[in-house]
């Protein structure tokens, strides 16, 4: 009997070509018009009931068979990044300053390849919801789809997603139950003081000095407030103030990125940042506002669904190509919003390591990165097996 990998192999070349086409035409968050039209057209041609417009450019393809009451959701992301591609590949981005630097082109095509096979060959019993999501890259497309009624229109008993991971051999599958990826929070601190001539600082309330003290004070939150066995990261990525060397400005602005792997720690850190900023600002005689924008929660995989996903990995590629409990990641992912509402699991698939080299071993969000085409067959076979086993 043929394995699922062998069954998916005959159509692999066509889907590799489709991946190259999507890679060549990348689209930024909430602008995935060509990509979503392509996805909707393919799903419709294979017999799915297709819904468009969720979260702006999101697409859901639904296939119902038999009388079974079980419902599973599988999600892929579609958006690209504002990065100038330097791979030199024949199918490199044709849009200046935009590229698929995180492999969402591959994620989309893996799920499309699985969708075609499931529609043509699988005799499952239940409801299959294939979710193609816009705007994962910092814009919360998952949250937007949910706000538009994703799970009210398409209820799921469990939901799953997959992301490629450079640094691991191509096709290796990595799982972890519990917290896998960190929360992320974007914070803007605005300091309003009193400007003055640089030669007469006693007439000023200096927001630059206050900002410098705040930056130093923020570092003590991790070292003195976060439990030693937990983690958090507070990064001040920007500090803007003034233009001239002899003018004390009236205003300064700091931009922060904050991450944690524990929901309680994340809440505590955000509270401490607010309190520390206000206290430091007051001590320097300036006014502070702290604005929280965007942000993703901690991504937490549920135990039962992760064990199920892990078993599918063992069945597909064998125990030697599965990492059953991989290390945690300090990156963030908006699939975490979906996991707050529906039990499920987010897994990783190796995209290449130093032994193979090439663009696939290059870290994501890098202008020299590319998704490994070999993963299209492996990833699509994984989704087929998971859907069939869940709905059988």
Image: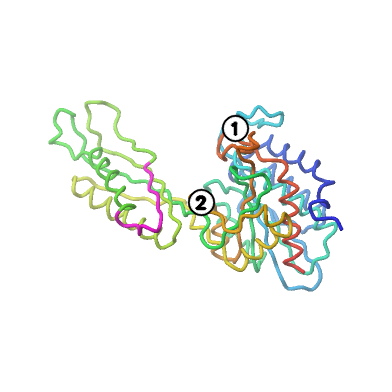
Q: Residues within 10 Å of mark 2 (few under 14, many from 20)?
A: few
Q: Residue furthest right?
A: 1
Residue 111 in percent (x, y) is at 72, 52
Q: Circle 2 sits on which residue? A: 329
User: Would you place residue 107 above or below residue 302 in this image?
Assistant: above
Q: Circle 1 sits on which residue? A: 368
User: Would you place residue 37 above or below residue 51 in this image?
Assistant: above
Q: Nearer the viewer, residue 326 or 154?
A: 326
User: Would you place residue 268 above or below residue 23 in this image?
Assistant: below
Q: Which of 175 and 281 is in front in this view?
A: 175
Tags 2 and 1 touching, CB below 8 Å: no
Q: Can you tell which quarter of the image residue 207 is in?
A: top left
Its colouring scheme is rainbow
Q: How crowded is mark 1: few (under 14 residues within 10 Å), some or many (20 or more)?
A: many
Residue 141 in percent (x, y) is at 57, 52
Q: Give the range drawn in magenta.
A: 224-236
- Quadrant of the drawing holding the N terminus: bottom right
Q: In this view, does 235 lie to the left or right of 352?
A: left
Residue at image point 70% right, 59% down: 314
Task: Residue 235: say if magenta.
Answer: yes
Residue 167 in percent (x, y) is at 58, 43
Spatial distance from mark 2 to mark 1, Cα to Cα?
A: 22 Å
Q: Earlier in the sequence, mark 2 or mark 1?
A: 2
């Amino acid at each position: 009997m043929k394995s699922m990998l062998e069954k998916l192999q005959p159509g692999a070349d066509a889907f590799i070509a489709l991946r190259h086409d999507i890679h060549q035409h990348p689209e930024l968050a909430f602008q995935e018009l060509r990509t979503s039209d392509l996805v909707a057209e393919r799903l419709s041609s294979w017999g799915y009931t297709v819904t468009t417009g969720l979260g702006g450019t999101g697409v859901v393809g639904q296939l119902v068979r038999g009388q079974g009451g079980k419902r599973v959701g599988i999600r892929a992301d579609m958006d690209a990044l504002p990065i100038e591609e330097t791979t030199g590949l024949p199918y490199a981005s044709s849009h200046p300053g935009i590229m698929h630097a995180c492999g969402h082109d591959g994620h989309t095509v893996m799920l499309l390849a699985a969708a075609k096979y499931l529609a043509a060959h699988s005799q499952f019993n239940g409801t299959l919801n294939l979710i193609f999501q816009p705007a994962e890259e910092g814009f919360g497309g998952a949250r937007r789809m949910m706000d538009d009624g994703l799970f009210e229109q398409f209820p799921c008993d469990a939901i799953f997603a997959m992301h490629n991971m450079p640094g691991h051999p191509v096709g290796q599958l990595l799982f972890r139950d519990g917290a896998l990826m960190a929360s992320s929070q974007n914070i803007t601190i605005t300091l309003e003081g009193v400007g003055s001539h640089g030669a007469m600082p006693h007439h000023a309330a200096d927001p630059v000095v206050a900002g410098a003290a705040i930056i130093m004070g923020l570092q003590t939150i991790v070292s003195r407030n976060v439990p030693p066995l937990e983690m958090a990261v507070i990064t001040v990525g920007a500090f803007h103030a003034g233009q001239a060397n002899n003018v004390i400005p009236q205003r300064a602005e700091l931009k922060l990125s904050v991450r944690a792997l524990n929901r309680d720690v994340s809440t505590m850190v955000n509270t401490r940042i607010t309190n520390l900023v206000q206290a430091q600002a007051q001590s320097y005689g300036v006014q502070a506002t702290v604005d929280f924008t965007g942000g993703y929660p901690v991504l937490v995989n549920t135990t039962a669904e992760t064990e199920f996903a892990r078993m599918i990995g063992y069945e597909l590629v064998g125990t030697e190509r599965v990492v059953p409990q991989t290390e945690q990641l300090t990156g963030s992912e908006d699939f975490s919003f979906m996991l707050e509402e529906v039990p499920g699991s987010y897994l990783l698939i190796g995209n290449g390591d130093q032994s193979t080299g090439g663009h696939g071993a290059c870290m994501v969000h890098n202008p020299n990165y590319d998704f490994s085409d070999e993963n299209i067959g492996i990833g699509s076979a994984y989704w087929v097996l998971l859907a069939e086993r869940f709905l059988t």
